[in-house]
Amino acid sequence: MDVVESLEALRAWRAGVISPLGFVPTMGALHEGHLSLVRRARGECERVVVSIFVNPAQFGPGEDLERYPRNLSRDLALLGGEGVDLVFTPTPAMVYPAGFATWVTVETLTERWEGAARPGHFRGVATVVLKLLNLVQADRAYFGEKDYQQLRVIERMVRDLNVPTTIVPCPTVREPDGLAMSSRNAYLDAAQRQAAAVICRALGAARQACEGGERDPKTLAAVVERMLAAEPLVRIDYVAVVDPVSLEPLTAIAERGAVCCVAAWVGAVRLIDNLLLAAPAEDRG
Ligand code: AMP
């Protein structure tokens, strides 16, 4: 496995590579969620590139940029065990050199939810992902449904800007108690870690209610809100039942299906999760 830091070294490697090339962008502190993307890429592509870059542009003031977990040697050992061909580990100065002045804004889709809670977050995400897609020139790039709004934003950007890379959505990988895997779970103490599992249980209860015939998005959101409110260590940021593509709040569940998105604080740690409550009509068996 090659590890390269510079853009030039990445370009040189890319020039000699056989297709299809798969790409998994990450911020490191790798867990089974990241590795599931890598395995999917490994299974579908001749060569696999993983990037590890904690992108300062997607963190707001007062967020956890400085203390975001970093463990490059462990990450490289994990990726080596997955048959990855190249790991790209640029520095912030390489990605954003002096005079950097061009930003990607995906409108509308980024206004609500994570975009509202974290101003500038999706501008940072879209910009770095477009830069990475331009550099790596992969045939396929793999993204987790865990970050549901991010996935939709990237799909929209790739479509709008004619980026010749296929975006492949990958299912959320969970801990045995249902908690969605996240590098930020490492911040939780034992009691918070246990409490955090309520997020997934609450989403599951809403799906069950939906499958049981409850079709009112407000009532479904209330199922989640009630369960989260009953856990004293958890504070709701938002619970939203939305259209799976536009992420607009739903007033009724229609053919396009419904996703429930949650953001909640567990102590000082902000966690997000989501679950498909109703599949789009064309996917329903
Ligand atoms: P991050 O390192 O948090 O930027 O995540 C890198 C990629 O891994 C993104 O596409 C995430 O959506 C994806 N990812 C993170 N956690 C999970 C998970 N639990 N299951 C599946 N994919 C995940």
Image (tube, rainbow, N blue to C red):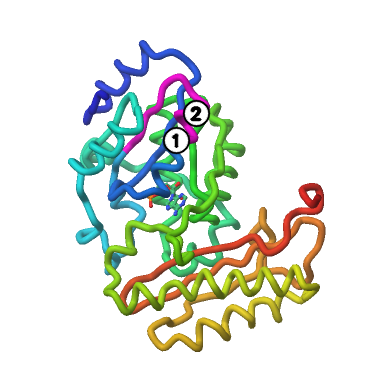
Q: Is residue 251 above or below residue 230?
A: above
Which residue bears the numbered disc 1? 39
Q: Which residue does the image show at 23% across and 37% down from the upper left?
A: 77
- Observer-nearest residue: 38 or 136? 38
Which residue bears the numbered disc 2? 43
Secondary structure of the residue carrying numbered label 2: helix
Please give left or right for residue 208 compared with residue 98 in the image: right
* Residue at far front of view: 176
* Residue at far top of view: 16
Residue 44 falls within the magenta-colored stretch: yes
Residue 200 falls within the magenta-colored stretch: no
Please give left or right for residue 84 compared with residue 249 in the image: left
Counting the numbered discs, the total is: 2
> Cβ–Cβ below 8 Å for labels 2 and 1?
yes
Query: Looking at the picture, how far across and down is residue 153, in whole percent?
Result: 55, 49
Q: Is residue 70 above or below residue 73?
A: below
Magenta stretch: give its range. Answer: 39-51
Q: Which residue does the image show at 34% across and 43% down from the upper left?
A: 101
Badge 2: how crowded within 10 Å, few (<14), some, or many (20+)?
Answer: few
- Observer-nearest residue: 39 or 239? 39
Secondary structure of the residue carrying numbered label 1: helix
Q: Which residue does the image show at 21% across and 39% down from the upper left?
A: 91
Image quadrant where one finds the N terminus: top left
Query: Looking at the picture, how far across and down is residue 275, in whole percent?
Result: 60, 62
Q: Which residue does the image show at 37% across and 77% down from the upper left?
A: 266
Q: Quadrant of residue 13?
A: top left
What amino acid is at disc 1? Arg
Badge 1: how crowded within 10 Å, few (<14), some, or many (20+)?
Answer: some
**Mark 2 to mark 1: distance in Å?**
6 Å
